Amino acid sequence: EAKAAGRSQLCFFKNSMQERVFERVQLEGDLRHAIDNNELILHVQPQWSVDKKIIGAEALLRWHHPDRGLVSPATFIPIAEETRLILPIGNWVLRMACQWLSDWQSNQAMETFVMSINVSAVQFSQDDFVSQVEQTLKEFDVPPNTLQLELTESMLAHDEGDIVRKMQALKSLGVLISLDDFGTGYSSLSYLHRLPIDQLKIDQSFVMNIERGTKNASLAESIISLGHSLGMEVIAEGVETSEQFDWLKDKGCDLFQGFGLARPMAIGDLLVLCESVNQQI
Ligand code: C2E
Ligand code: MG
Ligand code: MG
Ligand code: MG
């Protein structure tokens, strides 16, 4: 009987594996058409200054799947990376951001607004990545210092010389560079100071329970002083409560992003919010 139970369990396991593989293959196929079918949407989450003005936003992908509804980037970005579909998708994100930045040049409330976009390691490692950014900025006639690229610490783990050269090339274009999810990777401090990074983004895992003086609190505080000592701006992500905001502000954090300030939203809603928030005297 135990044997039978074991067998049925094995069978169950096998089925669920098959289902997962099947689901994955299906998602992969669907993702190939997502751009052309206009199923990808770029939401934006505002970034706030200490005095609660909106100074920029992070672009975050959403996939409206025709049958499955909203698919999270946590599910489809890894698939997009493995299949290299992240290359056309990432290019679409870059173009979208530049289109918006270009539109805003005639809008006084938005002309210094900084759009941050996430760049995957697969994209960054392409030989033509820097020239793609350069071409797109030119095509849309966008001031380079209004575009910020969010790179992650993990992509710094590879060929050091190549990464430094690429980041310097991006810097000489004038675009801004942010290091996302900072503190979760393993970049060495001696390496960090040689990179032309404008902004450190404290990972949201360190912001949790920060106001209760946990280990997170001392880590977040160290990241703020590290960033400042290297001449970088520091932003906290995942700010959910006013206690967290106040705590981070008190420790000298420069910028804030999180559900407690605003959730990711459609671009039209961001414009309305900016007009109402930034024009108050
Ligand atoms: P990320 O770049 O670290 O983005 C921050 C994530 O935290 C977003 O999740 C955002 O919605 C979420 N978040 C913001 N504020 C809060 C908060 O107060 N509390 C909590 N719990 N979460 C908060 P999202 O949109 O699901 O994106 C997940 C990840 O997917 C991103 O992490 C990024 O790594 C990736 N991703 C999203 N869009 C793109 C893209 O266009 N290109 C690439 N390569 N990756 C992307
Ligand atoms: Mg990000
Ligand atoms: Mg992040
Ligand atoms: Mg994160």
Image (tube, grey):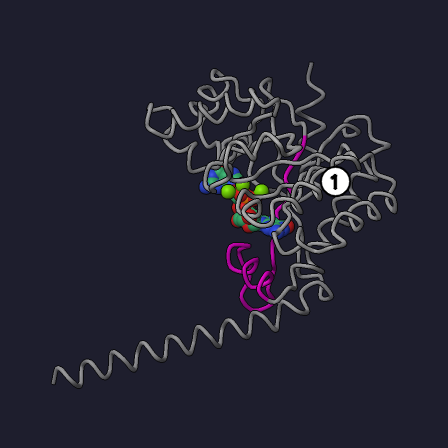
Above or below 32: residue 51: above
Task: Give the quadrant of the N terminus.
Answer: bottom left
Q: Amino acid at mark 1?
A: Leu
Q: Position of residue 136 (x, y in %)?
A: 82, 48
- Left or right: where 275 falls relative to 75: right
- As drawn, 269 above or below 110: below
Q: Which residue is mark 1?
A: 170
Within the magenta stretch, is there residue 95? no
User: Picture quarter containing residue 277?
Assistant: top right
Q: Residue at image x 65%, y 30%? A: 198
Residue at 78% across / 35% down in the picture?
172
- What are the residue bounds of the magenta stretch? 56-82
Towards the viewer: 124 or 9: 124
Q: Residue furthest left?
A: 1
Q: Position of residue 103 (x, y in %)?
A: 83, 39
Does residue 78 belong to the magenta stretch?
Answer: yes
Q: Residue at x 65, y 64 (%)?
A: 85
Q: How many marks?
A: 1
Residue 109 percent coordinates (x, y): 77, 26
